[in-house]
Amino acid sequence: MANLSIRKLDDDTIARLRIRAAHHRVSMEEEARRILRQAVTPSKHLGDLSMQFFGTESGVELELPQHAPHDPLSFAR
């Protein structure tokens, strides 16, 4: 695994990282890893998730019933 050193972080950033890490009950180093991992991980889109769960491999073929033609609804008074 690689190592990364980050220089010139201001005191306020370090303090906020320390508080955030304490809130999550992890070390500052682990909190920084989590933040970086989340920042560079591609987000999943709703369409991608629906294809994953309901795509062609896991979908169901449905036969739609035939309907008789009808006049469109009219909302005029």
Image (cartoon, rainbow, N blue to C red):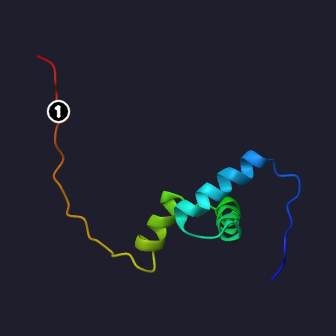
Q: Is residue 39 left or right of residue 45?
A: right
Whether residue 6 is visible here, answered yes or no, is yes
Q: Residue furthest left?
A: 77
Nearest to the observer: residue 16 or residue 63: 16
Rendered location of residue 30, percent (x, y): 66, 71
Rendered location of residue 38, percent (x, y): 64, 63
Q: Residue at x 26, y 70 (%)?
A: 63
Badge 1 marks a residue whose secondary structure is loop
Quadrant, the N terminus: bottom right
Rendered location of residue 13, percent (x, y): 73, 49
Q: In this view, does 71 lie to the left or right of 15?
A: left
Nearest to the observer: residue 61 or residue 7: 7
Please, is residue 20 above or below residue 50 in the view?
A: above
Quadrant, the C terminus: top left
Please, is residue 54 above or below residue 16 in the view?
A: below
Crowding near the residue tagged with mark 1, few <14, some 14–19, many ≥20 C-alpha atoms within 10 Å = few
Q: Is residue 6 left or right of residue 71?
A: right
Q: Which residue is drawn at 85% across and 61% down?
A: 6
Residue 66 figure quarter: bottom left
Whether residue 44 is visible here, answered yes or no, is no
Kindly identify which residue carries mark 1. Answer: 73
Rendered location of residue 15, percent (x, y): 69, 51
The disc labelled 1 sits on which kind of residue?
Answer: Leu
Q: Residue furthest bottom?
A: 1
Residue 43 figure quarter: bottom right
Q: Residue at x 44, y 65 (%)?
A: 50
Nearest to the observer: residue 54 or residue 18: 18
How many numbered discs sit on the rendered protein? 1
Nearest to the observer: residue 70 or residue 15: 15
Q: Residue at x 20, y 35 (%)?
A: 72
